[in-house]
Structures are given as structure tokens and as C-alpha cells.
Amino acid sequence: MELGEKTRRRLKVKNELLRQCMGEVLGTFVLLMFGCAAGAQVKTSRETKGQFLSGNLAFSVGVMSAMYLCKGVSGAHLNPAVSLSLCVVGQLPWKKLIPYSLCQVLGAYLGSAVVFFVYYDAIMEYSGGVLTVTGQNETASIFATYPSDYVSLKTSFLDQVVGTALLMLCILPVTDEKNTPAPDSLTPPIVAAVVLGISISLSANCGAAINPARDLGPRLLTLSAGWGTEVFSCFDYWFWVPLVAPMLGGVLGSLLYIFVIQWHLPDHEVDETKDQSGTAELKHRKYPFEEKKEIIGHKEVRL
């Protein structure tokens, strides 16, 4: 056995939940690295090195990259609203919800922290050395999301519910075997495209967080890095909206998919027969969109 294989076996984490948590930390770390770094580049360059679309594209690439990175280990939820929704529909044990969510917030915090240090000089130059949440040279929005001045609390809450419901409504069929699922290798870019669509159509009101970890992790980073408690108290303590509304929206979107689509999909019919010897097997699978018969593994047996 090679030395590398011995080392791998010795260091491999045996606990399944711990492995999954590690995957969620690293995946969400990558997601926020892409997203917050794009936000920092656009803002500190005063939109000379990117525009509004840059951040949306970066977050989408971050989703795709993170899913390829950790999907095989944890399922790549990257979002407490996704984890909660999958618990509700029975695809994730409830006991994993809190560990998953905490690890997602941790990964988001660490990712945004790296961006803060990488862009520290640019942030200080742009802000004049004063880290503020509001005003002409504010920099807090590089990391967390904040509402536009014209948006009411009710509208911003609805905005986040609708955005996250749309997210779950669009990604659940991608992995639903009863529907028209995508190949596993194509799931990340499809989900990334859904995130991009939501970002470029539902960002104007309050940034399209649609992910409590994506918002809370960077907000905690700004709290600890010098922006102060205003990151939580501004806009009449608005911070709870991107924490609560996506959780509700994700569940609503998931239930809507189940009630309106999944429960009404035709079941796949599988007929199995065997030849007289009992050794050769015929399998016929009928799909609602395909009447073709397929014989798999049929072998002629001579007596």
C-alpha cells in the first residue's frame, strides 16, 4: 500500500455527520469567497472593475463551484433554508438541521473574512478609513444585504419569501426521479443558473439573500471587523428579515412543488419476468413520456 493511501485511511474522518459538516463549511466558504470578493471589487473600484451583474454572476459561479466541491460529501445545501426544506419533505434527518446550519454560517463567516483581508486596503481607501453601514462611502453592503430606502418591512419580507420559494420550486425537480431529473454532473450548473435568474430579477429591493447563512455569516464578520453593532440595528433592526423570511419561503416553495407537481406525476411502472429456467431476467420500465420497451441483461439459456 502506498504511503498516500495509508495516510488517507489514517486521517479519514469516520463520523458521517462530521464529514458532512466539514463539506458544508468548505462549500459555503467558497460560495461567499466568490460573492463577497466580487462585491468588494465592484464597490471599491467605483464600478470601473465590474458592475451590478458581476456580483450576481460571481455568486452563481460560487454556487456551482461549491456544489461540485462538496455535493458528494454533504449534498451541498449551502443554505439553512434549503436544509430546513429538505427536512420538511423528508430528505434530510431533522437531527442534522442545526449542525448543517451552524456550519453554513461558519463557512460564510470565514469566506467573508478572507475577502475582508484580501480587500482590506481597497476598503480602507474607498471608505477613507471609516467603516460605515450607511452613507455615500458605506462598505457594509459588500458583505451582508441591506434594504433599499424605499422598501417597507412588509415588502422586503415578502421579497425574501418569494425569492427563496422560487429557489426551492425550481431546484427540487432537478433531482426528483419521478419528474425529469438532470444528470448528477449537471445539477450544479443548473442550480447556479436558477440562482443567477433570481439574483438578476429579485435583487433590487434588498439584495436577494435567499440564504440566512449567506447574510448572517458576513454580517457577523462586519460586526467583529469594525463596522460595529449598527450592522444589526440599522433600518429598524432589519437584519432578522433575511434570517426568517428565507426559511419560510423555502418551506412554502417545497410544499408547493409537492402538492401541485410531485403528487400528480405518473409513477414509473416496472415489470419483471423470468424465463422458464429462472435465470434470465427481462425488465420493462415505462415512463410517462416514453413507450419504448427495453430489455436489459437478457441471456438465452440452453437446456
Image (tube, rainbow, N blue to C red):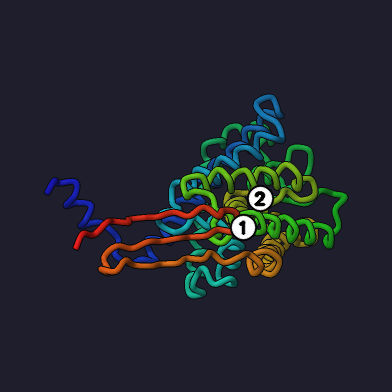
Three-letter residue code for mark 2: Ala
Q: In what element is the residue under mark 1?
A: helix
Instruction: State which tag comes first along the sequence, 2 or 1.
Output: 2
Residue 284: x and y, percent? 45, 60
Q: List the single residue furthest toward the front.
A: 303
Residue 3: x and y, percent? 14, 46
Residue 117: x and y, percent? 52, 40
What's the mark number on residue 206? none
**46 to 99, vertically: above or below:** above
Indicate the quadrant where residue 120 lies: top right
**180 to 130, vertically: above or below:** below
Give whichever of 15, 189 is nearer the camera.
189
Looking at the image, which residue is at 49% across and 47% down?
66
Residue 254 in view in this figure: no
Report which residue position mark 1 lands on.
216
Decide: marks 2, 1 in contact (CB < 8 A)?
A: yes
Three-letter residue code for mark 1: Leu
Indicate the quadrant where residue 223 lies: bottom right
